[in-house]
Image: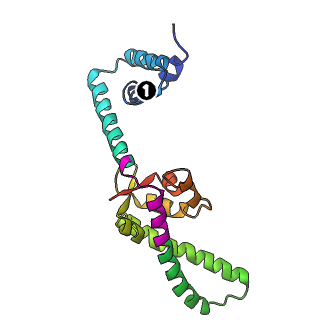
């Protein structure tokens, strides 16, 4: 007799089924595991393919665990933020007013738009080149940390751009109160680790 998981398991890929019966076995009910094993038998997944996928999944799990063990906590992340913020803010305070004197900004609204736009540009020019080329900002150099992808690789340019602009999410800084990773980490699929 089929259990309620039979239809669900029939829609899974071979890799998903093997993941369920190997590395994620403890996350599933016994009936779900039985349905997955039955689906593997129905598909006649050969031992070589099963073993290859199992090894791949184990390696991915080890990499994920290594990254998780090396990821840094909220205190270091906050220190990174403070150091980087001070640098961006000092540059902003010295350069923006000088440029502002040459611009015909009449109203408060124009001045506000200019300053907000300038701050976004300064943040982008600070974070994107440093994190893309070196995986570090000055704050991360001081705390001996770096940015990596969830696969423990150097982030691509699109990852760093996404990470930088996600910092503009209003509650990004508060997201560290609830989790080791901020919104800008989760959305860009990156982590900050010791390194």
Q: Secondary structure at mark 1?
A: helix
Dividing the picture into quadrants, the one containing residue 61 is: top left
**Residue 164 visible in the picture:** yes
Q: Quadrant of the C terminus?
A: bottom left
Residue 14 in percent (x, y) is at: 39, 27
Magenta region includes residue 81: yes
> Badge 1 is on which residue?
26
The residue nearer to you, when weighing 44 against 195, is 195
Q: In this rendering, is residue 71 above or below 173?
A: above
The residue nearer to you, when weighing 41 against 37, is 37
**Residue 151 visible in the picture:** no
Q: In this rendering, is residue 154 above or below 51?
A: below
Residue 47 in percent (x, y) is at: 28, 21
Residue placed at 45% from the left, 69% from the top?
127
Q: In this rendering, is residue 150 above or below 129?
A: above
The residue nearer to you, when weighing 77 against 170, is 77
Residue placed at 56% from the left, 54% from the top?
177
Magenta region includes residue 52: no
Query: From which residue to which does the magenta span run?
Result: 69-84
**Main secondary structure type of the part rendered in magenta:** helix
Residue placed at 67% from the left, 79% from the top?
112
């Amino acid at each position: 007799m089929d259990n309620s998981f039979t239809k669900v398991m029939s829609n899974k890929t071979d890799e998903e089924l093997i993941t369920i019966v190997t590395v994620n076995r403890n996350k599933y009910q016994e009936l779900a595991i039985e349905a997955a094993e039955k689906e593997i038998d129905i598909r006649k997944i050969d031992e070589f393919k099963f073993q290859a996928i199992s090894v791949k999944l184990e390696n991915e799990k080890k990499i994920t665990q290594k990254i998780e063990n090396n990821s840094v906590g909220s205190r270091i992340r906050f220190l990174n933020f403070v150091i980087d913020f001070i640098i961006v803010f000092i540059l902003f305070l010295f350069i923006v007013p000088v440029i502002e004197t040459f611009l015909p900004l009449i109203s408060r609204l124009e001045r506000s738009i200019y300053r907000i736009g300038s701050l976004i540009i300064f943040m982008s020019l600070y974070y994107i080149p440093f994190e893309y080329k070196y995986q570090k900002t000055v704050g991360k150099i001081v705390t001996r940390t770096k940015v990596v992808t969830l696969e423990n690789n150097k982030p691509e340019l699109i990852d760093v751009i996404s990470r930088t602009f996600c910092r503009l999410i209003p509650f990004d800084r508060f997201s560290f109160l609830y989790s080791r990773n901020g919104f800008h980490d989760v959305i860009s699929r990156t982590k900050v680790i010791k390194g």
